[in-house]
Each structure stands twice: as C-alpha cells, then as structure tokens.
Image: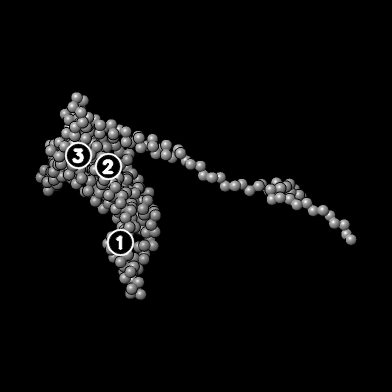
Amino acid sequence: MAAMTPTTRYSDSARDTEAPEDGAPARTPARRPRRPRPRIWRGAVLGLAGAYFLVPLVASFVFTVHVPGHGITFEAYTELLSADGFTESLLLSLGLAAATIALSLLLAVPALVAVRIGSPRLRPVVEVMCMLPLVVPPIALVTGITTVLRWGPEHLSRTPLYQTFIAVQNEKFPVVLVLAYTVLALPFVYRSLDAGLRAVDVPTLVEAARSCGASWPYLVLRVLLPNLRASLAGAAFLTLALVLGEFTIASLLGFRPFAVWIVSISGAQARMSVAVSILSLLITWLLLIALSRAGTAPSTGAAAPATTSRKES
C-alpha cells in the first residue's frame, strides 16, 4: 500500500493570512463594512446657520414690541396699515416686480431658445452681454439714466419722443425703473434659464413638435415652457427679491417704492421701520415659497393628451 501523506486542515482565517507560494501576492483578509457613524456636525452646522438668521430677527421683533417703561405693546404693527405711504409703496414695488419679471422673461426666453436651436456659437456673446450688469455698479447705471432723462426733454422737446420721456417718469408707475431693474436682473435670469435649457434636449423637442405640425408659438408655449417651469420660477424668484430690496436707483431717481419708504420713515419712527422690515421679509418669503411651489408642482395639462391618445389607439 502506498504511504498516506497527512493533510493539514486550515481554517478560513488561516487561509486568508497564509503566505502564498511561487511569489504570488498575499491576500488581504476581507474587512467588515463599518457602521455609519452619526454625523453630529450636520446638526451643529444647521443649528449655527439657523441661529445666524433667526437671532437678529428675534432681536428686531423684541425691539418693536418692547417699550422701556411701558412693557409689551404691538402699536408698531397695528399702525402699519394706517401709516402714510405704506400701501402705495408696497403695491408699487409689487407692480414693478411683476412688470420686471414679465419683461426680463420676454426678452431672455426667446433669445436663449433661438441661440440654443439656431446658432450655439453665439452663446458666449449672449452670456457676456447678459453678465455685463454685474460689472457696472448701480450708481454708475443710475448716473447714465439720469443724464439721458435730462438730455431727452431738452433736445427732443419738439418731437413726439418728448411725451415718451415724460411718460416713463410717471410717479404712479415709473417705467424707467422697470427698464433699469430688467437690466440688473438679466444675469440672474440668464443663469437660471441657461441651466434649465442645458438640462433639456431642446433640439429633439423642437424637431418632434415641428414634425407633428406644431407652430412656433405653440411649440414655445406648450412644449418648451412646461419643461422650463423650474428655471422660470427660479428666475422670477431672484428678480422678485432684487426688485423688493433695491434702493439705490429708485432713491436717486426720486421715486418711492417700498425699500425707499422704509428708509424714509426710519429716522422719525424707528420701531415702525423695523416692524415694516420684518413684515417685508415675511411677505418676500411667502411670495418666494409660492413661486418655488409653482415651479416644482407637477403639470396636469400633459396627462390629458396622453390619455386621449391611448383611447384613440
């Protein structure tokens, strides 16, 4: 009988750590996956950020309701609606914001869609033109606007353009502020719409819609704009915040929207001005939340054509 050679049994751990023969690389033992540690620093960062924003607001609110020697009173808030110029300035700022949003989107959306479809090489040129307002400070912009408004009536008094210069400076609704705010909002509108257009395959959508016989107005209104809803809401979001908080141009041109009215009453009625500032923040947040929800809400109009097409098929 042949001699039986003894065999040695190795455990799994020993096999993993056993030195290989013939110079083969050593096998490393399998590591157990680590348990995820609770990331406490996230809560700390969020807590610090919340304190950074909320502590000044709470301090401002306490300043408006606490009067030394009289205790707690809400007169600063109850007198807002009856304050001289509050309602007019707020409505003026909201009207200017709505007109600025409409004009900026009316200028930017067709231009960016045309560049995206027809001539992508012009995109750097359009980007530079839309970003120029970030380079020009508002004080320089309002100086140029003031010079043009003074030059126009003097040299064009015998032409029909004279009435145009007078109309754009109407105190009830100054169109010149809408034009200036549109220029200031162009960089933010461009960035928001450009990001949305990059996320959508615009040439494919256009070719599909045109092959089905859709006209260009129908294509823009019913095909492209629903896909750009989030970008449009973001552009409106930034433009609204810009218009409601702008002070320099309106003040130097002599108009009195909401931001200028707050500064004008701050010297005589400090508590009311702080109360109005808090109220303006709340109004701005509510409007921005409404715009963000409008941009992220699912569209219900696209479901009807799909169901009808299924029924027809």
Q: 10 Å neighbourhood of mark 2: few (<14), some, or many (≥20)?
A: some
Q: Is residue 32 left or right of residue 289?
A: right
Q: CA distance from mark 1 to mark 3?
A: 36 Å
Looking at the rendered image, the quarter that the C terminus falls into is bottom left
Front in this rendered view, residue 150 or 313 = 313
Q: Secondary structure at mark 1?
A: loop
Q: Amino acid under label 1?
A: Thr
Residue identifier under label 3: 258
Where residue 186 appears, as percent x and y from the top left, is: 30, 46
Residue identifier under label 2: 242
Q: CA distance from mark 2 to mark 1?
A: 31 Å
Are the residues tagged 1 and 3 within 8 Å (C-beta)?
Answer: no
Q: Is residue 238 left or right of residue 257?
A: right
Q: Amino acid under label 2?
A: Leu
Residue occupying image coordinates x 10% and y 45%: 158
Label 3 or label 2, whichever comes before in sequence order: 2
Q: Is residue 143 left or right of residue 40?
A: left
Q: 10 Å neighbourhood of mark 1: few (<14), some, or many (≥20)?
A: few
Front in this rendered view, residue 235 or 21 = 21
Looking at the rendered image, the quarter that the N terminus falls into is bottom right
**Nearest to viewer (mark 3 / mark 2):** 3
Q: Residue furthest top?
A: 69
Q: Is residue 112 above or below residue 88?
A: below
Q: Secondary structure at mark 3?
A: helix
